[in-house]
Image (spheres, helix red, strand yellow):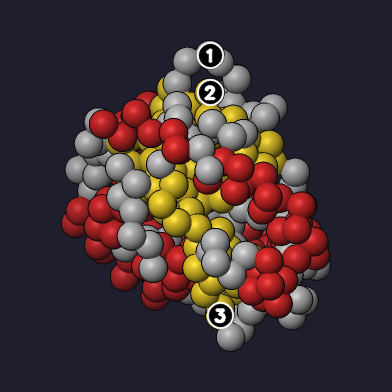
Amino acid sequence: MKVSVVMPNINGRSILEKNLPILFEAVSNPGNHIAEVIIVDDGSWDDSVKFLNKKYKNQIKLIKHTKNRGFSAAVNTGVRATKGDLILLINTDVIPKKDFLEALLPHFNDPKVFAVSAHEDGYGGARGFFADGYIQLGMTEETKESHPSFYVSGGSGVFRKSIWQRLGGMDEKLLSPFYWEDIDLCFRAAKRGYLNLWEPNGKVVHKHESTISKFPQTYVSRVKERNQLLMLWKNIHSKNLIKKHIVGILTRAIKHPGYFIIIFMALLRLPIALKARRKEIKESIVSDEAIFQKYQ
């Protein structure tokens, strides 16, 4: 199986200059089975595009958004242009080891595997559990064995393209500009019976130099909390868990009146969430409780 690399970029010229040479060391390793590198520039106003055209014109396929459309839109644009069977999503600030895909790829011999997470140094796989009326996230310990992961990061994971297409990719209509899109995607895959895994031997280092840090912190925090709500409203169908969520959201709003702003922001996209919810109810075959039991 061939791997297509998709890397979204927004104003990352300085990071690209440092990290692309390391990525191409991994590309040169035949054991990684990388067939192409696609970089989607999401409306940068620095000189990222000029730099890429000058230094990497013959090594990458460069796609340019005329305006900033957000992470999931950039990723979806890149995936639509791929030719490989598998999609490696990698952020500009993630530095891979030269052999990092060699341990991930054999997992895809199992047709039920949707996505496999690389091992970001210092972090285990993802946990997901339902508490206080919300989907809560955590991390597993770094182990020597692969194991299920609640989601696979959209910044350092490999995804099976055929299932990605079946799922419709990342939900850019509901969750743009950023946060919870990879969690939503993997949760939807799991509810259709597919597997998400974490592989300890696929090692990368995440420098956390992403451009999200350049946005106002209040805005980033509010979007993150809004998308937590929207992802839940779309994907949680258990009557028992919905009842717990109603109690949870009321409790948060009473204790923290500022949370009404988050609720209002989410309600603005409620029609989109409800339309997506109807589709998920129709196509899901695994219960919410079973998902949380497996990945907690």
Circle 2 SS class: strand
Disc 1 crowd rating (10 Å Cα; few below 14, some 14-19, many 20+) is few
For disc 2, the marked residue is 200
Q: CA distance from mark 3 to mark 2?
A: 35 Å
Q: Position of residue 175 (x, y in %)?
A: 51, 65
Front-lying residue, 213 or 201? 201
Work out whether 54 lies above or below 119. below
| 135 relative position to 14: left or right | left
For disc 1, the marked residue is 144
Query: Where's the N terminus, which quadrant?
Result: top left
Front-lying residue, 133 or 102? 102
Quarter of the image holding residue 47?
Answer: bottom right
- Badge number at residue 114: none
- Compare marks 2 and 1 and give the one earlier in the sequence: 1
Q: Amino acid at mark 3?
A: His
Circle 1 SS class: loop
Whether residue 282 is visible here, answered yes or no, is yes
Whether residue 136 is visible here, answered yes or no, is no
Q: How many marks?
A: 3
**Most extreme residue toward the bottom, as rendered?**
66
Front-lying residue, 207 or 247? 207
| 63 relative position to 195: left or right | right
Front-lying residue, 148 or 249? 148
For disc 3, the marked residue is 65
Asked if disc 2 and disc 1 are in contact, CB closer than 8 Å, the reply is: yes
Circle 3 SS class: strand
Q: Position of residue 275 (x, y in %)?
A: 31, 70
Q: Amino acid at mark 2?
A: Pro
| 30 relative position to 24: left or right | left
- Compare marks 3 and 2 and give the one earlier in the sequence: 3
